[in-house]
Image (cartoon, coloured by chain):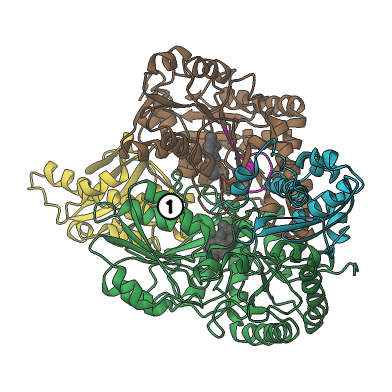
Chain colours: A brown, B yellow, C green, D cyan
């Protein structure tokens, strides 16, 4: 134990910037710096770079360039979508529908709105993390002004029936937002055919830079601004544009959506090798999330009798980067709200491990994890007072 | 995030295991909160001659158990009782604030084991001076 | 006319990233990418890089690291400060005091709050753009919950008496915010001695990257979040951190505040040479802003009988990058609210030019502008129906 | 932001200046809004034989004045009257939406100059077909 290689298996937390993306960004850090709102030549160059990126993002989503607004990331996009729609439509109603397994950028924003007098329905999910469209339909009332359901879950990887949910929202003429931060590049997205009115993106989840995202807002959707000020982004999002990052995001989304097929096949093959290897060699392990309707790179697995953080520390010691729950909350002591929502008891939720594969992972990475992980789990089990050496075969703790 | 000392006691925990016929056992924590510690002690002539633990929990919980069992070994029951969670944390060269409750669990585990021994001896149980357990368990398990 | 060199005189709009800053950022784009919220080694590296930058920003302001929160830029910082304080203190009162010459990130946010039921007093300024502290004191009421006055104006460069204003706010126990986006690096700032409770920064104004800013929040100040979600920035600003940009901002603020003396002397010397040259060679020109209490690099000058954009186009043709009004609003047809606030008639405001010098400007740059600008002005005056060849010497249009 | 044609007419404006004894003059715009156009015409036999302008305004205003004076030269008053702001903008290969009001000003300047001529001749003034001036002046000067 202890050799110094890094096996990165936390692509759901963030991804490395692709070299060609970093190279595309560099000139805008090092050289071209004009403020795109100005009128001289070097400013027009910046403006053109931004508009090229906007077209690239639009194309990846089947949207118009004029419907893409750049933001500082997925959290800002989610906050803007939820608060912007809520406040702009307050006179129509105060009811928002979302799911129990959204990212905190959605959930905490909804909780904030509850304190501001909005009513929020959190639709439950089944044991696989799936939303039942019938539940959505039932939750709709006369005062519903927004439906927000994530495209794919960041923890357990479950892919929701977004097109169906969008169709229901459309039928009731309610704006439909989806947090597609984890989905882009893994699932083909088309905002027109899937009836999506608003969609959040974050560049660093698809090999682009951190600190840059986008919100797609279908033409005609009524929404308040989140950040007021200058006239940037067609007067909808103030702030001098982060040109380098926007250029990087454009390039990254083009690359990520160009080869979804290849990417999926490659990643899924590796993922299944890793997953099957784990399930075969480690007893008392269960996969969380849907067996098929899941992101190609995602594994989320619970190991009974042990706790997640201590697994991560051992894996880190071996150079393996993994996560338990979502990265944002790993500082927290509460078990993941997503794992609780799919019905895991707290103590099992505490023992969950998320491994998310990416483009650069190899079979050798997988084999190394399969060598290390069983040792880590059994080592921790041996010191666990809950573990009786396999004699609790049928226990459910 | 963790000191070298914590990592050392996490990676090479001292005194893992169970004592076959322990003179005292203390179990604290709650699987719902993500940590359980079980402390076993052997007592001879009012001195803790052996201490072992089994722990389900995070790195800090394991390191705290390891350090606490180290600290009580060879101590009289009175001296062992006086070992506070702060002493455990200090011996570990500090714990992140969010993990301080692990050292509290360790202190409580020792106390429970000692009182278990006293009970078995027909002696009155000692009282916790700072019954911080609940407050801390709450922050450990904030749902 | 027409040679291809670029003379950049729009440093108030944005600045180039210093090469050493870009170099400091590059590893975090190209290599170190761990999500700082995770627990493994490469994540801890990111966390350390962020905390180093936080300490650098804190030091530049005389603050504690724990009082610095990274944002996506000056506009977000301003929005957060204003809305965050307003909503968190709504029960105490609904009155906000600001000035008539704030950046739109403040003004439009205040206007938004007026629609939400807050009352805003916009303190006027004198002919130089200065706030009278007595006006502030008079504006304070029992329901005042926030005072926000900019440190230095982005258009006319006037530096406000911030320490005095802060002392008044402190006396009345009202949180005092200042938009220091233009001031940092030009004016020594100390939030303790100047009684500043909140302060906005934007990295791209001091040779750092675009898309990154900070809000200083004095310990104990009650403020709501603007972007809800994950636990980043001590649970006050959600979103995966823009590590590369944060590292760049830390480095840039260190450089910008290390040599304020040198910077000021160098820039002011060049600025005065340019300003005097203009005033000597071009009639019907007047300096806007305060003659002494102004940013060292700022010139804002009105040329009668002509309009600003046509000047910019001619200057651009010569490779000179300049601005009229603030860059954010150059797409707008309204004359600058700042120039109107200092009492310029509309038609004079329309004919204003802002030249803002930076570290890399040279005497040769100044001399070239002094060669070009008089020709541009007279050319445009010759085709202006308002200009009668100097015969209107005493007119005030 | 501007087409090459706009930049050409901005940098090399045609027909700048005043006509000494013009047959018609039209002044439109408002210095408060940042643009004034003054159009001068000479008329001979119902044909505009010369047109000149002086303009205070942005690049688009100068280019529009230049193009409008070009377009009306040699035209009968009737044909010149028919030249719309769209024709001016199209001849300039387009204007940014925010600058369309400049072409409107040019159209109105020509109309005013023609009506000035007609008035001097004792003829009734022609009426604007699309009196868009106000709407556009508002958007030009949105305070
Ligand atoms: C005084 C002032 N405040 C705020 C801002 C907004 O900063 P940013 O464009 O980085 O959001 C600017 C710059 O445009 C400014 O000059
Ligand atoms: C589903 C989902 N939504 C939103 C976010 C927030 O994105 P960011 O951290 O870029 O603000 C994340 C990532 O943390 C995510 O996985």
Q: Residues within 10 Å of mark 1 (few under 14, many from 20)?
A: some
Give the residues in magenta.
Answer: A199-210
Corner quadrant of residue A191: top right
At horizontal 33% and vertical 52% (from top left) the residue drawn is C118
Q: Is residue B19 magenta?
A: no
At horizontal 33% and vertical 46% (from top left) the residue drawn is B52
- Asked if residue A22 can be seen in this view, the reply is no
- Would residue B15 appear left or right of C184 to someone viewing this image? left
Image x and y of residue D45, in percent: 91, 46
Label 1: which residue?
A: C111
- Figure quarter occupied by ligand 1: bottom right
Q: Front-most of A238 and A386?
A: A238
Image x and y of residue C295, in percent: 58, 78
At horizontal 67% and vertical 30% (from top left) the residue drawn is A63
Relative vertical location of residue C304 with respect to residue C146 in this rendering, above or below: below
- Asked if residue A198 can be seen in this view, the reply is yes
Q: Front-most of C235 and A135?
A: A135
Image x and y of residue C147, in percent: 36, 65
Image x and y of residue A54, in percent: 70, 40
- Would residue D11 appear left or right of C211 to someone viewing this image? right
């Amino acid at each position: 134990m202890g050799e110094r290689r890094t096996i990165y298996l936390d692509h759901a937390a963030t991804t490395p910037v692709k070299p060609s993306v970093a190279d595309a960004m560099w000139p805008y850090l090092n050289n071209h710096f004009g403020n795109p709102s100005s009128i001289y030549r070097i400013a027009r160059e910046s403006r053109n770079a931004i508009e090229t990126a906007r077209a690239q993002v639009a194309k990846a989503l089947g949207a118009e360039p004029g419907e893409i607004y750049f933001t500082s990331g997925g959290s800002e996009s989610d906050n803007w979508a939820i608060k912007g729609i809520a406040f702009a439509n307050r006179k129509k109603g105060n009811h928002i529908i979302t799911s129990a397994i959204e990212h905190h950028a959605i959930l905490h924003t909804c909780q904030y709105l509850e304190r501001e007098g909005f009513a929020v329905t959190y639709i439950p999910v089944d044991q696989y993390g799936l939303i039942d469209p019938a539940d959505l339909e039932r939750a709709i009332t006369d005062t519903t002004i927004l439906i927000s359901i994530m495209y794919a879950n960041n923890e357990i990887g479950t892919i929701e029936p977004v097109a169906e949910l969008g169709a229901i929202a459309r039928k009731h003429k309610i704006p439909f937002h989806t947090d597609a931060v984890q989905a882009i590049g893994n699932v083909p997205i088309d905002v027109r055919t899937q009836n999506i009115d608003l969609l959040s993106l974050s560049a660093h989840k698809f090999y682009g830079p951190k600190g840059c995202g986008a919100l797609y807002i279908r033409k005609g959707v009524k929404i308040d601004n989140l950040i007021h000020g200058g006239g940037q982004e067609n007067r909808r999002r103030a702030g001098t544009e982060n040109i380098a990052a926007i250029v990087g995001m454009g390039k990254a989304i083009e690359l990520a959506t160009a080869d979804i097929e290849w990417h999926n096949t490659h990643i899924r093959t590796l993922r299944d090798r890793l997953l099957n290897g784990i399930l075969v060699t480690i007893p008392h392990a269960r996969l969380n999330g849907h067996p098929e309707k899941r992101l190609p790179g995602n594994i989320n697995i619970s190991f009974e009798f042990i706790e997640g953080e201590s697994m991560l520390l051992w894996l880190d010691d071996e150079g393996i980067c993994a996560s338990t729950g979502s990265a944002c909350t790993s500082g927290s002591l509460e078990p993941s709200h997503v794992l609780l929502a799919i019905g895991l008891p707290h103590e099992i939720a505490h023992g969950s491990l998320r491994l998310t594969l990416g483009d650069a992972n190899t079979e050798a990475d997988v084999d190394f994890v399969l060598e290390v992980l069983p040792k880590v789990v059994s080592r921790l089990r041996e010191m666990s007072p809950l573990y009786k050496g396999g004699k609790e075969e049928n226990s459910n703790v | 995030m963790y000191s070298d000392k914590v990592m050392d006691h996490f990676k090479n925990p001292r005194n893992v295991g169970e004592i076959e016929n322990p003179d005292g056992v203390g179990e604290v924590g709650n699987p719902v909160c993500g940590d359980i510690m079980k402390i076993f002690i052997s007592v001879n002539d009012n001195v803790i001659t052996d201490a072992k633990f089994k722990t389900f929990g995070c790195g800090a919980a394991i390191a705290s158990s390891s350090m606490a069992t180290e600290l009580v070994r060879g101590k009289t029951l009175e001296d062992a009782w006086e070992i506070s969670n702060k002493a455990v944390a200090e011996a570990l060269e500090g714990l992140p604030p969010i993990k301080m409750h692990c050292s509290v669990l360790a202190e409580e585990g020792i106390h429970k084991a000692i009182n278990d021994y006293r009970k078995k001896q027909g002696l009155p149980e000692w009282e916790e001076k700072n019954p911080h357990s609940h407050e801390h368990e709450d922050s450990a398990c904030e749902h």
